Amino acid sequence: MSDKVNFGVAEREGGLGRIKERLDKVRALIQEPEFLEGKGLSNEVNIRIFCYEPENEMLVRHFVNQMETDQSLDCHLKICNLYKTFLSICDDMDITDAIPDMEEADGSVYLLEQLNFAIGNGEFIDKIQYEPHEPGDVLMLTGVGEVFPFMRIHTLLEALQPYFSDVPILVMYPGEFDGRQLKLFNRLTPNDYYRAFNVIE
């Protein structure tokens, strides 16, 4: 019994060591001139996706929080939590307080339909966009799992790319991306997306 327990602990520690190592590589990657300039890509779109196991979410959030206050980075990191962005949009529309009552009265399916009708990619882009873009900027998108199902990352990236054609975008993604399809949480129905590149295997 103790051997099984020890094996489980070692397996978890090995997994933690692996994700920490991969996050360290992310930190190094976003400071590389080739990344910042989009060199080495087969098309003009500088969108990268960092996939991680959903159970490592809290570790990734801790990493992002550290990066947000890291003054030693050789890049200008712009971090956008999509769930916080969604809540901010709801606040601007003065509907935040009404959401729980609507869900209770009409059900979650109706609520989702109404929110998807009221809040689209345009509202997200208005919140995410900033001026001026400067050399060395990196847009990091987080909160992808939190904001689901109110926003789908593959449709947002398609809409966002023209506004950030001069800025590399890095998506912190709790799921899988095989270069053709995004699979949130490693279990939901995949969505086709071809214009990004997987980073840090």
Image (cartoon, rainbow, N blue to C red):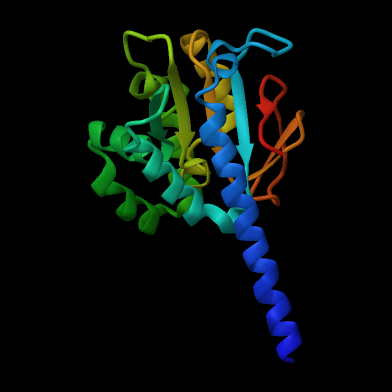
Q: Relative to 193, say whether 83 is above or below.
A: below
Q: Nearer the viewer, residue 174 or 105?
A: 174
Q: Is residue 173 visible?
A: no
Query: Residue drawn at (42%, 19%), measured in percent from left and top?
Result: 122
Q: Quadrant of the C terminus?
A: top right
Q: Is residue 19 visible?
A: yes
Query: Residue drawn at (64%, 11%), measured in percent from left and top?
Result: 39
Q: Relative to 72, say whether 19 is above or below.
A: below
Residue found farthest to the bottom:
1
Residue 15 position within the rendered picture, expressed as x and y whole percent measured from the top left: 66, 59
Residue 162 as seen in the image, left or right of residue 40: left
Q: Relative to 112, say whether 195 is above or below.
A: above
Q: Quadrant of the N terminus?
A: bottom right
Q: Nearer the viewer, residue 21 or 117?
A: 21
Q: Nearer the viewer, residue 164 or 91?
A: 164
**Looking at the rendering, which quadrant does residue 107 occupy?**
bottom left
Query: Residue drawn at (69%, 83%), measured in percent from left and top?
Result: 5
Residue 171 as seen in the image, left or right of residue 99: right
Residue 117 position within the rendered picture, expressed as x and y whole percent measured from the top left: 45, 30
Number of numbered discs visible in the structure rendering: 0
Q: Relative to 156, say whether 50 is above or below.
A: below
Query: Residue drawn at (42%, 50%), measured in percent from left and top?
Result: 62
Residue 178 position within the rendered picture, expressed as x and y whole percent measured from the top left: 77, 35
Residue 182 as seen in the image, left or right of residue 20: right
Residue 159 as seen in the image, left or right of residue 22: left
Residue 20 position within the rendered picture, expressed as x and y whole percent measured from the top left: 57, 50
Q: Nearer the viewer, residue 129 or 133?
A: 133
**Looking at the rendering, which quadrant does residue 128 occupy?**
top left
